[in-house]
């Protein structure tokens, strides 16, 4: 997955947690690409990263400045993540419609 972002510096902690969670819950590698520098009086924190399906940061760009980093993806790691973090396997899509209908009555 690729996530292109313009996250202001004030939201850095939020996005660092969110990128790991997104990779884990989707059992996927996530490339998070964030703007850095100042635009229209907003500070963007940079920190682009490649996150593994287990939530580990493989490579991370510098904060608060432009940077380019390369990371290597090992597709065999997907099997380990699927085995030990089975979020996709444990989904119950048949319940989504039921929950939707119940929430409409609230």
Image: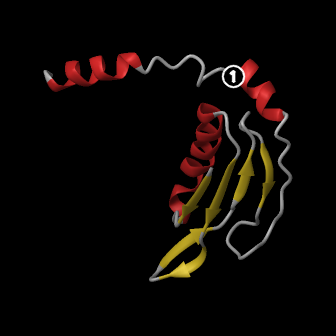
Is residue 74 shown left or right of residue 53?
right
Q: How is the image coloured?
A: secondary structure
Q: Point out the image quarter for the C terminus.
A: top left
| Residue found at x 82% / y 40% | 75
Where does the image place residue 79, in percent across and percent down from the top left? 79, 27
Residue under numbered circle 1: 85
| Residue found at x 69% / y 62% | 47
Judging depth in this view, the residue of 9 and 59 nearest the camera is 59
Judging depth in this view, the residue of 8 and 25 nearest the camera is 25
Where does the image place residue 53, in percent across and percent down from the top left? 72, 36
SS at badge 1: loop
Where does the image place residue 23, in percent across and percent down from the top left? 64, 40
Is residue 105 shown left or right of residue 1?
left
Farthest residue in the bottom direction? 40
Q: Which corner quadrant of the image does residue 88 belong to?
A: top right
74 vs 5: above or below: above
37 vs 32: above or below: below
| Residue found at x 60% / y 19% | 89
Judging depth in this view, the residue of 68 and 93 nearest the camera is 93
Where does the image place residue 19, in percent across and percent down from the top left? 61, 46
Mark 1 surroundings within 10 Å by alpha-carbon count, few (fewer than 14), some (14 through 19), many (20 or more): some
92 vs 12: above or below: above
Q: Which corner quadrant of the image does residue 100 belong to?
A: top left
Farthest residue in the left direction? 105
Judging depth in this view, the residue of 62 and 59 nearest the camera is 59
């Amino acid at each position: 997955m690729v996530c292109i972002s313009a996250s202001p510096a004030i939201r850095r902690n939020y996005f660092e947690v969110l990128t790991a969670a997104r990779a884990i819950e989707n059992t996927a590698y996530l490339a998070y690409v964030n703007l850095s520098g100042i635009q229209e009086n907003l500070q963007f924190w940079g920190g682009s990263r490649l996150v593994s399906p287990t939530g580990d940061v493989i490579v991370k760009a510098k904060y608060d400045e432009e940077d380019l980093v390369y990371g290597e993806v090992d597709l065999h790691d997907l099997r380990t993540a699927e085995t030990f973090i089975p979020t996709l396997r444990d989904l119950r899509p048949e319940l989504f419609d039921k929950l939707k209908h119940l929430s409409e009555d609230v």
